Image (cartoon, helix red, strand yellow):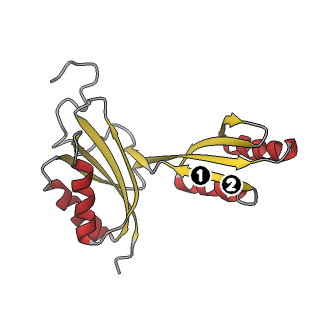
Amino acid sequence: MNRETIHTISVLVDNEAGVLSQVSRMFSRKGYNIESLAVGTTHNPAISRMTIELLTTQEKAELTCNQLRKLLPVHSVKLLSSESAIKRELLLIKIATADSIERNEVMQIANIFRASVIDVSTESITLAIIGDNEKNHAFENLLEHLNIMELVRTGIVALERGTSTIDEDTKEKGEFDYGKNVL
């Protein structure tokens, strides 16, 4: 039985208008819900990296990768295994604090999770934490009993461990030529 689990797909695409829309339309047409999406430029400003998380079967994740490869602005696609990928997400959370006792409680929890205090006022405290999904979820759960004013997550970004890179056979020239002037 092929059960649904979270699958992480890393995609190199042209950094130009309409590419994100084209990729997201492909998921929409197939009836897939994107659980997490993070997009940013690489060190080559002409190329962006998308990290997409889907709740689906292994078979459908592989099919999705094949369909992504057919899109014109896509340079490279790789389905990352959970064992070989480093995954992180940034979480920002703003908590209303009525007094110094509440602020101290929030700061103690932040210290345990190695979160950063990025803003403090007499009425609130804002924290930032970078971690995997489980760590961020546990952090959020510990703060749940307090007055959370706002919370935002960036979505997962991921790279493979070691010297492996995204689809080395088809990678975009220049994407990995660090320190060289390649154009």
Position of the C terminus, as image quadrant, is top left
| Residue bearing the label numbered 1 | 151
Q: Is residue 14 above or below residue 135?
A: above
Residue lying at 27% horizontally and 48% vertically, measured from the top left:
11
Q: Position of residue 123 (x, y in %)?
A: 77, 43
Q: Position of residue 105 (x, y in %)?
A: 81, 47
* Mark 2–mark 1 CB contact (< 8 Å): yes
Splitting the image into 4 quarters, where does residue 170 fall?
Answer: top left
- Packing grade of label 2 (10 A; few <14, some 14-19, many >=20) is some
Numbered disc 1: secondary structure: strand
User: Is residue 171 left or right of 102 when viewed as pictured?
Assistant: left
Farthest-out residue, front: 123
Viewer-side residue, 5 vs 110: 110
Residue type, mark 1 in image: Leu
Residue type, mark 2 in image: Ile
Give me the disc on residue 78: none
Q: How many marks on residues?
A: 2
User: Is residue 59 left or right of 114 when viewed as pictured?
Assistant: left
User: Is residue 60 left or right of 142 when viewed as pictured?
Assistant: left
Viewer-side residue, 147 vs 53: 147
Q: Position of residue 166 (x, y in %)?
A: 27, 44
Q: Is residue 183 above or below residue 169?
A: above
Q: CA distance from mark 2 to mark 1?
A: 7 Å
Q: Position of residue 19 (x, y in %)?
A: 22, 48
- Packing grade of label 1 (10 A; few <14, some 14-19, many >=20) is few
Give me the disc on residue 148: 2
Viewer-side residue, 94 vs 131: 94
Position of the N terminus, as image quadrant, is bottom left
Numbered disc 2: secondary structure: strand
